[in-house]
Image: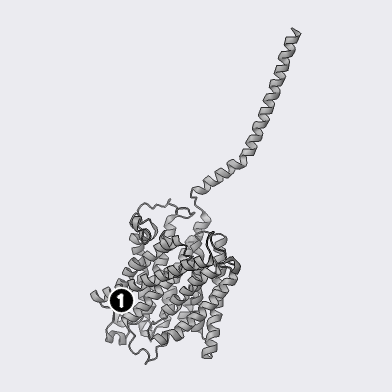
Amino acid sequence: MKKILSMIALVGALGFAGFALAEENAVEAVIDAAPVAAEVAADAAQAVPTLSAGDTAWMVVATVLVLAMIIPGVALFYGGLVRTKNMVSVLTQVFVSTALMSVIWVVYGYSLAFTDGGSLNAYIGGFSKAFLAGITPDSLLDGGTIPEYVFVTFQLTFAAITPALIVGGFAERMKFPAVLAFLALWVTFVYIPIAHMVWGGGFLGELGAADFAGGTVVHMNAGIAALVGAIVVGKRLGYGREAMPPHSITLTMVGACMLWVGWFGFNVGSELAADGIAGLAMINTQVATGAAVLGWIFAEWLFKGKPSLLGAVSGAVAGLVAITPACGFLGPMGSIVLGFVASIIAFWAVTSLKAKLGYDDSLDVFGIHGVAGLIGAIGTGILMSADFGGVGYEEGTTMASQLYAQAVAIGVTIVWGGIGSYILFKIVDLFIGLRASEEAEREGLDTAEHGERAYHY
């Protein structure tokens, strides 16, 4: 009996020991599994879009900054550059075109630029979000941390500023109804497809073309259209024979300052988040612009004998344009080089190339936005290299392959934008007529088209 009780006690002791050991192993297993479970949970949380109040607040500010670039930034910059008798006309064209693009964008522009276009997706999106269908205050941008309405409005400002820039190419001589008709057609058939090809899932983005904030989509696109418009509409009466100085460098400088400040919304906002890349885009925007101002006035000092305020603000805009496609990819030192070089080349385009070719691009949209945008797109492909302090190329990409992608994007923008703009100008000329009458042009478009004057003495 004692032996039986001893065996039972032994078995019980062994069982208790086994239970304790199993419990200890289970606890260790739970502890070991905890980091894995936490990592899985974190990945799952990241997979589900979550609203970020910080990102959203920044993007609202960035959107307002870009809008301020247009009205009153571009309006004042351009308005000061024209003659007194045409200032109201330029202000009206920029202001009203901004209103027109706002409506077009939400009706169909956003959908065609940023949704899947099915079999045509390489070139254009679809109508699944026409009239902003399916978007609610709770809708978040796919894979993002901001409301989709905020992204729609941010991109709306890009679609508004690009046509407004074109106005400078044919300023002082094009009829107001023709301006609105052309810009409405242009944003539909030129801007939206290029935006989709680069940013909306089209083939240029898939190819790897790097355009952080709009070097090809905005600036080269606008520059090419302005050049085509200057040629198709023809030169201003008296161009080359009569003096046509800017009527207010002061207003132009104020507009340029608003552009410089607002450009942080343009470039930094294109990161769509308040993070380290946004900080990189910020410092690059500032130092590239500073270097571009110095480059332009040094060139002007050397070749014209005096540095001018107009030259300084022109250099600033050239630098802002050049850094736009590159701001999230370069290091600060590379940005200084890009701004300085682009500014000098833009100076040459405005002072020498324009005179040699003989076109009348009233406010040098092509020379600054088109040329500096092209230099920025090429420079992005070179200076984003880690060897030059940039963020480096994606895995499997070399400088040669990146430059190839940049060249294709540049070529498509020039061809699509050039041919498309020419056709649209001709269509508008056929149905409305592009050119103001000689009498209206001599009187000034302010009174002839709008019945107003900018100044009363």
| Image position of 148 (left or right of 326) | left
Give the amino acid type for the residue marked by disc 1 in the picture.
Answer: Phe
Residue positioned 49% across, 72% down in the render: 378
Image: 378 above or below 25 = below
In the rendered image, the quadrant that contains the N terminus is top right
Q: Residue furthest bottom?
A: 241
Image: 322 above or below 309 = above
In the rendered image, the quadrant that contains the C terminus is bottom left
Q: Residue furthest left?
A: 431
Image: 151 above or below 292 = above
Residue 100: in sight, yes or no?
no
Secondary structure of residue under mark 1: helix
Residue positioned 54% across, 46% down in the render: 43
Residue 270: in sight, yes or no?
yes
Q: Which residue is mark 1?
A: 176
User: Residue 260: horizontal and vertical position, in percent?
Assistant: 50, 73
User: Residue 391: horizontal and vertical position, in percent?
Assistant: 57, 64
User: Residue 354: horizontal and vertical position, in percent?
Assistant: 42, 84
Dividing the picture into quadrants, the one containing residue 338 is bottom right
Dividing the picture into quadrants, the one containing residue 438 is bottom left
Of the pair 87 and 14, the residue shown nearer to us: 14
Residue positioned 42% across, 57% down in the render: 149
Q: Residue furthest top?
A: 1
